[in-house]
Image (cartoon, rainbow, N blue to C red):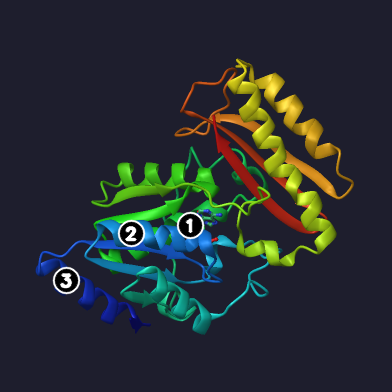
Amino acid sequence: MQTIATVSEMQAFARDRRAEGKTIGLVPTMGALHEGHLDLVRIAAARADIVVVSIFVNPTQFAPSEDFSRYPRELEADLAKAASAGAHLVFAPAPEEIYPRGYSTFIAEEHVARPLEGVSRPTHFRGVTTVVAKLFLICQPTFAVFGQKDAQQVAVLRKMTTDLHLPVEIVVAPTRREPDGLALSSRNRYLSATQRGEALALSRALFKARDMVAAGERRSDRLIAEATHILRDQRRVRVIYVALVHRESMEPLREVIPGDSVLAIAAWVDEVRLIDNIVL
Ligand code: AMP
């Protein structure tokens, strides 16, 4: 497996492969790779000639108060994991390579990015859309794979891709969970054993909503009330939002639209901010 750290080399590599008629599948990540990320790589490997994994802790998607400086960085281990899952190339640029001194151009989606995560993290998606647009221009993928774990990110990136006529297919992978339900996340390592136990309330709340829908419930207020009740049962959990939204627009729904509704949760478990969701 090859590693590239500069934009010019990455663009040249992608241009040459595309000229040869090869398809490129891109998996954008911030590293600290876990099995959820590797699922994305395996999905890409099943359908692309060349699989590129990008590893870049993107400073513009973190607010000054957030965990940018302490976000885990473990490139050597990530390279081995990416290779084992079928990556052909890892693109791992330094921050100055992507944002040279004086950098001043941003891409912002201004509707889907507003609710939910956009309320607590008003500059987050501007950072995400900017870096993903750059990665598309640098890596020239045929398709890119993202995780359903970040449902609003998927919706924002789909909208950006449509609005800007970007010739990249967006592929979505299901959320990978621990056997007890906890969604895999690079931030789970911040949790103590006690906190991790309480964090299970997020997936428990989502599964309860899924069971209610299977039993015929459609009303969002009933689903939200039950999920919130499960979360509030935990001493260390503080609810940021519980919302039933349309999976594309992220607009609130009064009732479940089967297959198009997402129940989304964000909560603090002490000082660790977690998100999770389920498609209903
Ligand atoms: P991150 O490195 O956390 O920015 O995530 C990189 C990609 O992996 C994003 O598309 C995430 O949605 C996806 N991802 C993160 N956690 C999971 C998970 N548990 N299951 C599936 N995909 C995930």
| Whether the residue under disc 3 has CB within 8 Å of ligand 1 | no
**Quadrant assignment for the C terminus:** top right
Which comes sooner in the sequence, label 3 or label 1? 3
Q: Is residue 160 above or below residue 45?
A: above
* Cα distance in 3D space between marks 3 and 2: 16 Å
Q: What kind of element bears circle 2?
A: helix
Q: Is mark 1 within 8 Å of ligand 1?
A: no
Identify residue for label 1.
128
Name which of mark 2 and mark 1 comes first in the sequence: 2
* Element class at badge 1: helix
Task: Residue 44: give its label.
Answer: 2
Which quadrant: the N terminus?
A: bottom left
Q: Amino acid at mark 3?
A: Arg
Residue 204: x %, y % from top left: 71, 39
On screen, residue 127 versus residue 48, left or right, reads right
Q: Is residue 92 visible?
A: yes
Position of 102 with respect to 185 (left or right) is left
Classify mark 2: residues with Cα within 10 Å, few (<14), some (14-19) or many (20+). Answer: many
Q: Residues within 10 Å of mark 1 (few under 14, many from 20)?
A: many
**Rendering coords of residue 261 (x, y %):** 52, 28
Q: Pick out the residue farthest to the left.
A: 20
Amino acid identity at mark 1: Val
Q: Which residue is located at x 38 percent, y 61 percent?
A: 42
Q: Is residue 36 left or right of residue 52?
A: right
Amino acid identity at mark 2: Ala
State whether residue 199 is above or below residue 211: below
Residue bearing mark 3: 17
Residue sitting at 21 percent across and 65 percent down?
49
Name the foreground residue: 62 vs 81: 81
